Amino acid sequence: MKILRYMMFAALLTALLPQTAGAKGTVVPKGYLFGFVANFTDSVVYFTDIQEVDSIWYDKRSRFLLGRDVYANQLRTHFAEQMNMPHRTCIVSFGLSRKDAEKKLMKMRKLYTGKNAGAYEIRNLNENQFHFTTVNASESEDTPMTKAERKAAREELKQKQKEARQKQKQAERERKQAEQQRKQARKLAKASHAKKDAPAPTPVESTLPPAEVEMHE
């Protein structure tokens, strides 16, 4: 039985998005992006390859990617139109160097491996399947998460984790119950077959003399 779990988006956002307000956006010749895609009712999650993108705008003080919503929407549109998977939650992260982006990617993937190994199916999208297009975010109004927003995200995460644990326990109880029913069915079937295959009882021959047999009859 597939166990449905809520995704830890609030945790991802809290861990990966900068936490301080930034200054005016700055553009660099290139940056490195990757995307994460999931759905609350699906245990399959997607990661794109780390991609080199020209002209990345970011907040120099907080190293916060500007235009992130536009990049995320590119990924969301691809899933909706090209893969027939609408209503996906998309997160985009970046690094000024490939090494920086790789660290963030490993951090995100770790949430779906390790102790959670087997709970999720991870699929990858290479650049031939999807490619980010440069966004001019020189006038972007994107702002980092505020303290209140981070607190709300943590509370939301706690609630979703609680709901996920409850769903997992319920699914485990249903699995054990189904397994017990299958064992009982196999036991009954085995007993039924054994009864059918058992040899017919052999008549007991009388050891009494003929006269006594007649008297007994």
Image: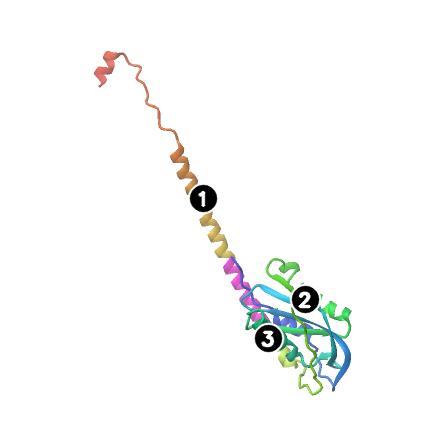
Task: Name the amino acid type tagged 2.
Answer: Asn
In percent of width and height, residue 141 lies at 67, 86
| Element class at badge 3 | helix
Label ID, residue 26: none
Sequence-wise, the earlier of marks 1 and 2 is 2
> Which segment did they paint magenta?
157-171
The residue shown at (35%, 27%) is 201
Spatial CA span between label 1 and label 2: 47 Å
Decide: is 214 above or below 70.
above
Label ID, residue 186: 1
Residue 163 shown in magenta: yes
Q: Mark 2 points at which residue?
A: 126
Decide: is 26 above or below 49.
below
Spatial CA span between label 3 and label 2: 16 Å
The residue shown at (33%, 21%) is 204
Q: Nearer the viewer, mark 1 or mark 2?
A: 2
Spatial CA span between label 1 and label 3: 49 Å
What crowding class fits label 2: few (fewer than 14 Cα within 10 Å), some (14-19), or many (20 or more)?
Answer: few
Please tell me which residue lies in front, 92 or 158: 92
Q: Mark 3 points at which residue?
A: 77
Task: Name the amino acid type tagged 3.
Answer: Thr
Please tell me which residue lies in front, 99 or 153: 99
Q: In which quarter of the image is residue 129?
A: bottom right
